[in-house]
């Protein structure tokens, strides 16, 4: 997928530049863009290093468990047919908590475990169950409290207030999550 | 009122998050400094992994921009965008976001460099980048890991939710940062 996208971008650019006679600009653009990419990467490095350190502390701090308790009613609402004490509910909640706290690397293992456990409950092993659909839709439109990569990127680009987009991000993410949950309920019976 | 509360919340959330994390960890007798250093080691390898993606995408976009093709495409889409009042610079990012995480991160970088992070375009791009995950990647990974072939309504609904999020990003940013 990404291979096609990248090829089309490069191909279109090169062909159009040949047609418009901008060959020199293209060579300049290649070098300038590559340099820009490395420069941004280097300024990201500082904040990524700090944030990864901090996330490790948060992981050990037990915040995940507190978030877990906070999200439990939500899980009851989203997955009414899953028993509260079943291990799958725990995996789903841990995945959601890690996503909210922005711990992507911690979220993925919990998410994959949740999928395995949902698959054990699933009758038709090749077709997604209702719970799988809901889980993945909530997951892809997931709410993150601190979108640190974007904040870091803004800081690296010289923003005066890199964190100012956190509020708007949370509002936008809530909109997409609500749309996902509603449409999931609407289309669920039709896609069986 | 809305502007003040949304931006004040944004300004406080990182310090509060750091404080809560540190205090909870210290209470649990976690060796905070050692743990921090241990986690921070991941920074450099991530940087090394990220560079090829950033270079590949930024060069492709740079070439596209220098050739004039981007303006051509956006010119075609213009009538549709004006109807919904969507800034054209955002469109490539909205198309890329569900497909590739590193690709859209690179596009956001490009927009922030070109339009400036504190411009309306820069703020909308930041909001879009932060507000959703890479739908296609997540679905492929999670369904693939357990061998599900029939994914039912998940892909269309997921993509539509992304679209709703993008439109929300444009509207909210215009309201808050106007």
Image (cartoon, coloured by chain):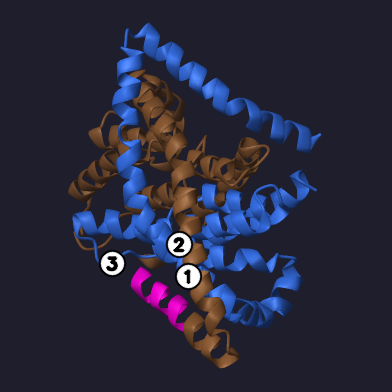
Q: Please tell me the colour of chain A.
A: brown
SS of the residue under disc 2: helix
Q: Which chain is blue?
A: B
The answer to whether residue A94 is visible is yes
- Residue A149 lies in the magenta stretch: no
Seen from the viewer's position, the closer of residues B178 and A36 is A36
Residue at the spot x=54%, y=48% of the render? B131
Magenta-colored span:
A1-11
Residue for badge 1 = A30
The answer for which chain carries disc 1 is: A
Q: Which circle marks residue B150 in the picture?
A: 3
Residue at the spot x=20%, y=55% of the render? B146
CA gap between label 2 and label 1 equals 6 Å
Where is residue B9, by image quadrant? top right
- The percent position of residue A26, horizontal first and vertical second, equals 52, 77
- Residue A9 lies in the magenta stretch: yes
CA gap between label 2 and label 3 equals 41 Å
Q: Are marks 2 and 1 in contact (CB under 8 Å)?
A: yes
Do pointers 2 and 3 mark residues of a single chain? no
Do pointers 1 and 3 mark residues of a single chain? no
Judge the density around disc 2: few (<14), some (14-19), many (≥20) Cα neighbours within 10 Å: many
């Amino acid at each position: 997928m990404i291979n096609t996208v990248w090829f089309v971008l490069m191909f279109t650019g090169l062909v159009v530049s040949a047609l418009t006679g901008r060959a020199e600009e293209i060579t300049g653009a290649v070098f300038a863009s590559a340099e820009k990419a490395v420069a941004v990467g280097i300024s990201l490095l500082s904040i990524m290093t700090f944030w990864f350190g901090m996330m490790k502390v948060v992981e050990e701090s037990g915040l995940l468990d507190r978030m877990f308790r906070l999200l439990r009613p939500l899980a009851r609402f989203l997955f009414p047919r899953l028993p509260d004490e079943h291990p799958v509910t725990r995996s789903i909640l841990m995945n959601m908590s890690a996503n909210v706290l922005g711990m992507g690397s911690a979220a993925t293992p919990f998410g994959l475990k949740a999928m395995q456990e949902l698959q054990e409950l699933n009758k038709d092993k090749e077709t997604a169950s209702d719970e799988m659909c809901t889980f993945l839709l909530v997951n892809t439109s997931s709410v993150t409290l601190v979108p640190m990569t974007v904040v870091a990127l803004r800081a690296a680009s010289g923003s005066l207030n890199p964190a100012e987009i956190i509020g708007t991000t949370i509002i936008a993410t809530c909109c997409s999550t609500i749309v996902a949950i509603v449409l999931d309920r609407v289309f669920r019976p039709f896609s069986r | 009122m809305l502007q003040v509360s949304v931006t004040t919340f944004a300004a406080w959330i990182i310090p509060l998050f750091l404080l809560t994390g540190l205090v909870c960890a210290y209470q649990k007798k976690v060796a905070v400094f050692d743990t921090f250093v241990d986690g921070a080691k991941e920074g450099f390898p991530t940087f090394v992994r990220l560079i090829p993606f950033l270079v590949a995408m930024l060069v492709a976009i740079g070439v596209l921009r220098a050739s004039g093709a981007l303006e051509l495409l956006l010119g075609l889409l213009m009538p549709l965008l004006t109807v919904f009042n969507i800034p054209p610079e955002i469109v490539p990012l909205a198309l890329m976001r569900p497909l590739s995480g590193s690709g859209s991160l690179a596009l956001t970088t490009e927009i922030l460099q070109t339009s400036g992070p504190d411009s309306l375009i820069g703020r909308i791009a930041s909001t879009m980048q932060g507000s959703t995950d890479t739908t296609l990647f997540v679905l492929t990974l999670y369904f693939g890991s357990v061998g599900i072939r029939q994914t039912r309504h998940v892909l269309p609904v997921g993509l539509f939710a992304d679209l709703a999020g993008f439109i929300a990003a444009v509207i909210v940013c215009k309201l808050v940062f106007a």
